[in-house]
Image (cartoon, rainbow, N blue to C red):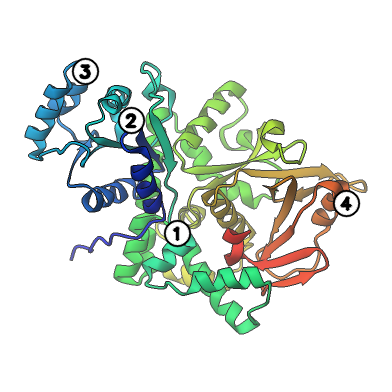
Amino acid sequence: MDEIKIIFKRKLYDRLLAWKKESQGTTALLIEGPRRVGKSTLVEEFAKNEYESYILIDFARAPKAVSDLFEDISDLNYLFMRLQLYYNVELHERKSLIIFDEVQKQPLARQAIKYLVQDRRYDYIETGSLISIKKNVEDIMIPSEEERMYLYPMDYEEFRWALGDKVTMPLLKTVFESKRPVGDGVNRKLMRDFRLYMLVGGMPQAVNAYIQNNNLQSVDKVKRNIISLYEDDFRKIDPSGRISALFDAIPSELNKNTSRYQVTSVIGSQIEDKKIEEFVADMQSSMTVNLAYHANDPGTGMSLNQDTSKYKMFVCDTGLFVTLAFKDRDFTENEIYEKLLNDKLDANLGYIFENIVAQTLVATGNKLFYYTFPRETSNHLYEVDFLLSRGNKISPVEVKSSSYKRHKSLDEFCEKYSNRIGSRYILYTKDLRKDKNILYLPVYLTQFI
């Protein structure tokens, strides 16, 4: 029996409404995001609800006759007539939307946005993945009339909405603002709920599979298909498979607890730094990964002092990360999922919690930075997992997968840069508490910091 496709509520919808109202056709909107994140579904739902009519041109499937229309746009009347005839849709001036889906497949359509927007008859939204890769745009003029928005995997609040829960997140916000503990029993329940989100992830297909089947093994199958799709995309860019290898190695590299992603340990040392930079740039453009760069001078201008050769790499969705971590098996058994869900698996889950924190921080508009510095008494390094810029201060964040009492790296960092420090956070699995200047938060409160 075929699964029913559920249309999930996404926060970006409200931003689309604001764009429509404020732009009034003076700009087009480009929505970027990893494949299978729900871009096309969101935009088509928006078109159905907010316009009298719309045309969706999927350039991954559009016939050559439609794609070729953008070879010559000197006569827009002819272009619009042909589109209306082919899609059997009547367009209404200032009341219709034209969607360029998978626009990276036809760069000339993206270039045409400049003139289509100037014409002002209709609104335009573009969607795409791998859209910034050089070969897709090197021969075209990128339109300045283009606004960009990014669609990330469903965040925890969107996930709770999908499960029919509109109560939990407002209550969690109240908990964060009050800085009061919820009690061990309630915290255990909230952590179990959050672990479910970590395992299922925020890719709409995976969430849909969970809701329809209530079975994590069927969810795992969906996630493996998405990972395979990403790997196929990477092989189109680099047939040697080195980019796919870099992606597959993310869990193992994080598990090593080293101060950076060790590229040479994955694909060997016989490769130029410039080529490595191109690979990493392509992965970033696909939005399948999140990178945290080393901040050489921690402060409010960390982007100006980041070390682009020193970074940690995370998967864009923690549900995919979990499946990737157990990719050595044909499928991730329900038993493994059940143990992960109940925190019973004999494995260091710190790297999974780091990934979900990175994912959440990116989704809430943060750039990722971390910091390492040498210890005086050994060859090891102190490391602060994440640094957040807040006003004219920085907030250090440490992530732990269990209860613990030591936070030497955080203490030394705060002493080293005492005049720059704002709030100090430890994200872990136990209840909220405050110890001197440090706020201990259960990881499900990450999005509020």
Comes first in the chain, label 2 or label 4: 2
- As shown in the figure, which amino acid type bears the numbered disc 2? Gln
Q: Nearer the viewer, residue 17 or 372?
A: 17
Percent across and percent down for residue 432 are 68, 72
Which of the 4 image quadrants contains residue 357?
bottom right
From the viewer's perspective, is the residue at label 3 or at label 1 nearer? 3
Labels 1 and 4 touching (C-beta < 8 A): no
Residue drawn at x 68%, y 71% is: 179
Comes first in the chain, label 3 or label 2: 3
- As shown in the figure, which amino acid type bears the numbered disc 4? Glu
Alpha carbons under labels 3 and 1: distance apart? 40 Å
Q: In this view, does 439 lie to the left or right of 65?
A: right
- As shown in the figure, which amino acid type bears the numbered disc 3? Glu
Q: Name the residue under label 4.
A: 415
Alpha carbons under labels 4 and 3: distance apart? 61 Å
Q: Mark 1 points at which residue?
A: 201
Specify whether residue 34 is in view.
yes
Which of the 4 image quadrants contains residue 20?
top left
